[in-house]
Image (tube, rainbow, N blue to C red):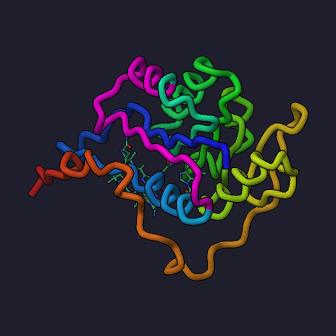
Amino acid sequence: MNSKILFVEPPRNFWFVMGEYLPPPSALLILAAYVERELPGIDIDIVDCQADRLDWQGLERYIESANPSMILTSGFTTNAYSCARACEIAKTVNEDIVTIVGGIHFSFTPEESLQSFPEMDYIVRGEGELTVVDLIKTLENKGKISQVQGVSYRNNGKITHNPARPLIENLDTLPYPAYHLVEENLKRYHFTCTWV
Ligand code: B12
C-alpha cells in the first residue's frame, strides 16, 4: 500500500448548550481502526484541529508537511462547510490529494453536496468501515469505482450514486476505536457538564 491517508477533524464551532467540552473525533477513530486492521502497512495519520489548536492556516501547514495522498473528513449538517473547506485546502496544497467525506450530512445529501462542493471527490454514504477500505483499495489498484458500493462521485462529470452497501451484520467484529492515533490528545478530551 503506497497511500498515505490523513483523517481530518477540521476547526469547528461547538454547541454552546453543552458547556465546555472537547470530544474525540469518534467516527474518524472508528474508521481509522478498521482501515488499520484491514490494510496493514498503510500509513495512517489523524489531525484533530480542536485538540491540536490548529486554525485553517495551521491545517494547511499540517497537510503540506504530512503530504497525504488522501484526506478523509466527517460531517454533521452544522459542520458541512468545515468539511468542504478542509477539502478545498487539501486541493490547494496539492490538487492530486483525493478527498473523501462521509457522515450523517453527506450520507443524506450526496447529490447536492457533490454539486455544491467541487473540492469533494467521493462521498461515502452510511456505514463507512467496509466502504472506505474498498474505496482505498480500488483507488490504489486503479480499479472500477463503479463497483464500490455505498459511494457517490463524479463519473466523467456526471454525479453517480453506486448502490448502497448492506449493513454490517455483527458490529462486534469491528475493532476498538484507534485512540492510540491521538494518544497525546487523550488528556485533553473532556465534557464538563454545566447544567446540573
Ligand atoms: C454522540 C453525538 C454527539 C456528540 C459528539 C461526540 C463526539 N465525540 O463526536 C455531541 C454531544 C458533542 C454532539 C453534538 C452535536 N450534535 Co450530535 N449526535 C451524536 C449521536 C448521538 C451519535 C454520533 C456518533 O458518534 N455516532 C457513531 C459514529 C461512528 O457514527 P457516524 O458518525 O454516523 O459515522 C459512521 C458513518 O456516518 C460513516 N462516516 C462518518 N464520518 C465519515 C467520514 C468518512 C471519510 C467516511 C468514509 C465515513 C464516515 O462511517 C461511520 C462508521 O460507520 C448522533 C445520533 C446518531 N445516533 O447518530 C447525534 C447527531 C449526529 N447530532 C446531531 C446534532 C444536530 C448535533 C449538534 C449540531 C447539536 C445541535 N446544536 O443541535 C452538535 C454538533 C456539535 C458540533 N459542532 O460538532 C444530529 C445531526 C443531524 C444532521 N443533520 O447533521 C444527530 C444525527 C442527532 C439527530 N438525530 O438530530 N452530538
Quadrant (top left/top right/bottom left/bottom right) for the C terminus: bottom left
Camera-side residue: 175 or 116? Answer: 175
Camera-side residue: 111 or 99? Answer: 99
Q: Is residue 95 above or below residue 68?
A: above
Camera-side residue: 2 or 172? Answer: 2
Q: Is 179 on the left-hand or right-hand side of 67?
A: left
Q: Position of residue 168 (x, y in %)?
A: 62, 75
Q: Is residue 39 above or below residue 80?
A: below
Which of the 4 image quarters holds residue 119? top right
Q: Position of residue 106 (x, y in %)?
A: 61, 46
Please tell me how many numbered marks the rendered image carries: 0
Q: Position of residue 87 (x, y in %)?
A: 58, 29
Q: Is 95 on the left-hand or right-hand side of 7?
A: right
Task: Give the residues in magenta.
Answer: 39-63
**Does residue 117 appear in this view?**
no
Q: Residue at x 34, y 49 (%)?
A: 182
**Does residue 95 appear in this view?**
yes
Q: Is residue 148 above or below residue 48?
A: below
Q: Position of residue 24 (x, y in %)?
A: 33, 51
Image-quarter location of ligand 1? bottom left
Q: Residue at x 53, y 34 (%)?
A: 83
Q: Residue at x 54, y 65 (%)?
A: 37
Q: Is 19 on the left-hand or right-hand side of 96?
A: left
Q: Is residue 45 magenta?
A: yes
Q: Residue at x 50, y 27 (%)?
A: 63
Q: Is residue 58 magenta?
A: yes
